[in-house]
């Protein structure tokens, strides 16, 4: 595709060792030949692709000594010809060189425009571009890993396989609808049902991965709960490694949920310190208690804290009832005060003061949240993909249901809907609005 040349700084704003200015389009070499002189060469620029050339980059008002590389279409990120200048990483240096590319005819690239071109030129599926955004925007190693799996088309590969099967089934349906024969149709529907059930099962498997994927992308929500003064705020601070929550001896001081995020083995955990959920006459404290209850109920994981001093009572029973259906870690805190009589009825014994048991607690947090799930399977992290897969499964299940008594052309409609829903992931059936939204998450220069 002969699109106009677009240009942008591909590296982040600010000072650094190196900055990269990238031009993509129908003739970036023409622009390069007017502003780059390779060392030891004169005359018309003759570039071998994929080789770095040192030389002088002429920005008009100043020059820099840097590198230039040419990626030849279609073997480039965008699928178009690309030229990159690697200059010294000063903001004014990079901007000056960028300005010069504009003066020579390049247009300023919009957000994600390079990646959009890669998508339009078939270099990446839509899901892969989202994986790229996840890698760039990811703030935990696990998110980067999952983003890379998306970027390397792990989800698209599976979806394409299902799409190919559905397409074959649709072709068969069309043929039978065109030349109907009763006996053959019945047998055909039986075979179709088996094939559709297999598609539905595989969709179910994929969808099941979102439980982990969501936790990777958004982090595991952890509610630290239990009676006041058992040391919840202190434990949160220990886990976070700095003093964030307010610690005091007066019961009921943690009025609001305080959030902090930690990484355990590369995965994100969002910690919430909850107020005690005792009955209280204090209106403000009651608001805190309500919030605590809603956090405890929606959390992925609960850490239930007791200590040696306060024992267990009605309030503990209330909290335990709230968390009975979710992964739970029971800890006994203030182990430094226990002397010899450490009770054993807990998953871990901790001390927020000495740090004892905190490593074990982290280990348990990871284990209870992810168990032994394989990292390689964790690529369903985008809600958009989850929704499209869920819709696809609904349609295929409708088609399976229709196999009991409906004619082939009606079944065909549901099968086509399944294919369409999957096409939203690869990009084949994604609307302009969806595409627009995805690329708005990118930065300029990507
Ligand atoms: P919360 O109300 O459950 O959040 O409890 P805090 O974290 O505010 O702690 C209540 C009191 O217990 C404070 O004086 C803390 O210093 C103290 N405390 C918390 N954890 C420990 C611990 O492990 N050992 C000891 N000795 N004191 C602790």
Image: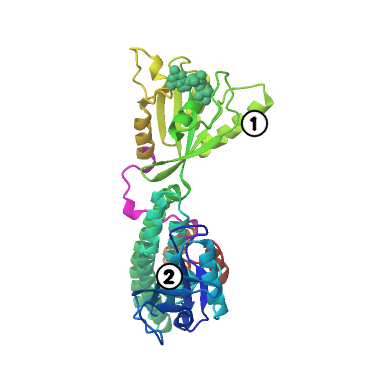
Please say whether residue 378 is one of the residues in the magenta stretch: yes
Q: Which residues are magenta?
A: 368-386
Q: Nearer the viewer, mark 1 or mark 2?
A: 2
The image shows residue 111, relative to residue 231, as above or below, that is below
Residue 360, how many percent across, how many down?
34, 31
Query: Which of pointers 1 and 2 lies earlier in the amino acid sequence?
Result: 2
Q: Which mark is residue 287?
A: 1
Image-based side of 132 in relation to 373, left or right: right
Please say whether residue 374 is one of the residues in the magenta stretch: yes
**Mark 2 Cα-neighbour bin, 10 Å: few <14, some 14–19, many ≥20:** some
To which quarter of the image does residue 404 belong? bottom left
- For ligand 1, tell me if the residue under mark 2 lies within 8 Å: no
Residue sitting at 38 percent across and 76 percent down? 71
SS at circle 2? strand
Residue 21, how many percent across, how many down?
48, 69
Residues under labels 1 and 2: Cα distance?
A: 63 Å
The image shows residue 309, relative to residue 122, as above or below, that is above
SS at circle 1? helix
Looking at the image, which residue sits at the far bottom? 44
Looking at the image, which residue sits at the far top? 340
Residue 370, how many percent across, how many down?
36, 43
Q: Which mark is residue 65?
A: 2
């Amino acid at each position: 595709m002969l699109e106009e040349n677009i240009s942008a700084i591909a590296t982040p704003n600010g000072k650094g060792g190196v900055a990269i200015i990238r031009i993509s389009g129908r003739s970036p070499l023409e622009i390069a030949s007017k502003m780059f002189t390779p060392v030891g060469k004169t005359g018309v620029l003759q570039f071998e692709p994929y080789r770095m050339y040192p030389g002088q980059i002429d920005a008009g008002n100043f020059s820099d000594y840097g590198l230039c590389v040419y990626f030849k279409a279609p073997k480039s990120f965008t699928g178009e010809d690309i030229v990159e200048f690697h200059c010294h990483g000063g903001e004014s240096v990079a901007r000056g060189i960028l300005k010069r590319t504009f003066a020579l005819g390049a247009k300023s690239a919009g957000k994600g425009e390079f990646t959009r071109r890669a998508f339009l030129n078939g270099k990446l599926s839509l899901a892969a571009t989202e994986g790229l955004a996840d890698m760039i925007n990811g703030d935990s190693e696990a998110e980067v890993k999952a983003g890379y799996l998306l970027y390397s088309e792990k989800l698209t590969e599976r979806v394409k396989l299902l799409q190919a099967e559905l397409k074959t089934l649709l072709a068969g349906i069309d043929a039978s609808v065109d030349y109907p024969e009763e006996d053959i149709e019945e047998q055909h529907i039986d075979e179709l049902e088996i094939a559709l059930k297999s598609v539905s099962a595989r969709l179910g498997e994929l969808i099941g991965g979102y439980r982990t994927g969501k936790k990777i992308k958004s982090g595991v929500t952890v509610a630290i709960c239990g009676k006041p003064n058992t040391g919840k705020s202190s434990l949160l601070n220990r886990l976070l490694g700095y003093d964030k929550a307010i610690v005091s001896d007066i019961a009921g001081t943690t009025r609001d949920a305080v959030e902090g995020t930690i990484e355990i083995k590369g995965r994100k955990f969002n910690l919430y310190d909850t107020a005690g959920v005792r009955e209280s006459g204090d209106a403000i404290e009651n608001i805190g208690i309500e919030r605590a209850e809603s956090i405890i109920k929606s959390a992925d994981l609960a850490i239930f804290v007791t200590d040696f001093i306060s024992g267990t009572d009605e309030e503990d029973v209330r909290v335990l009832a709230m968390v009975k259906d979710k992964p739970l870690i029971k800890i006994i805190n203030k182990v430094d005060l226990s002397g010899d009589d450490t009770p054993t009825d807990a998953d871990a014994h901790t001390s927020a003061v000495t740090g004892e048991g905190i490593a074990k607690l982290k280990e348990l947090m990871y284990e209870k949240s992810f168990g032994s799930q394989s990292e390689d399977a964790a690529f369903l992290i985008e809600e958009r993909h989850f929704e499209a897969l869920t819709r696809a499964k609904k349609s295929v299940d409708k088609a399976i249901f229709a196999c009991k008594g409906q004619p082939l052309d009606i079944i065909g409609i549901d099968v086509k809907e399944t294919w369409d829903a999957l096409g939203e992931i690869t990009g084949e059936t994604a609307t302009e609005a969806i595409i627009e939204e995805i690329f708005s998450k990118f930065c300029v220069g990507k």
